[in-house]
Image: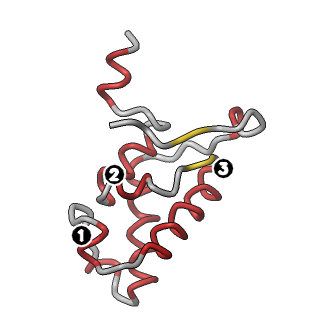
């Protein structure tokens, strides 16, 4: 998988680093609010498309994540990391998945 995070030069030093747990909680609340359900009804292991959300919601989510993390995200990141768990893991690692870090050693 290729990572869909880029930083503009002005944002490189200002990216907000949140833990996977913090990003998961944000995503769960985001999904619950958009679906008008209790956050406890959101399963972090289910693909986003299983919630029958349209592309406008996923693009909006990517845009809101950009604001939260102060970085630039490709709106298709939600399709590459299709669950709350995988997306939050990717984002908490600053855009590098564990196997990509291993390649750099």
Residue 38 falls in image quadrant? bottom left
- Is residue 22 rendered to the left or right of residue 81? right
Q: Earlier in the sequence, mark 3 or mark 2?
A: 3
Residue 2 position by quadrant:
top left
Asked if 8 appears above or below 104 in the picture, the reply is: below
| Residue 16 image offset from top left, x and y in percent | 61, 45
> Considering the image in quadrants, where does the N terminus appear?
top left
Q: Are circles 1 and 2 on residues that touch, CB within 8 Å? A: no
Estimate how packed mark 2 is, as few (under 14), some (14 to 19) or many (20 or more) residues with alpha carbons within 10 Å: many
**Residue at image mark 1:** 43
Disc on the earlier residue, 1 or 2: 1
Identify the residue position indicated by label 3 in the image. 70
**Residues at marks 3 and 1 touching, judged by CB atoms closer than 8 Å:** no
- Image position of 65 (left or right of 89): right
Residue drawn at x 55%, y 70% as measured from the top left: 60
Residue pointed to by mark 2: 81
């Amino acid at each position: 998988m290729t990572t869909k995070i880029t930083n503009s030069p002005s944002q490189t030093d200002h990216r907000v680093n949140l833990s996977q747990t913090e990003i998961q909680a944000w995503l769960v609340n985001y999904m619950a609010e958009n679906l008008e359900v209790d956050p406890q009804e959101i399963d972090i292991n289910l693909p986003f498309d299983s919630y029958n959300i349209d592309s406008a919601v996923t693009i909006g989510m990517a845009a809101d994540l950009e604001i939260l993390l102060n970085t630039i995200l490709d709106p298709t990141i939600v399709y590459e990391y299709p669950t709350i768990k995988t997306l939050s893991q990717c984002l908490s690692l600053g855009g590098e998945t564990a196997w990509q870090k291993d390649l750099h050693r």
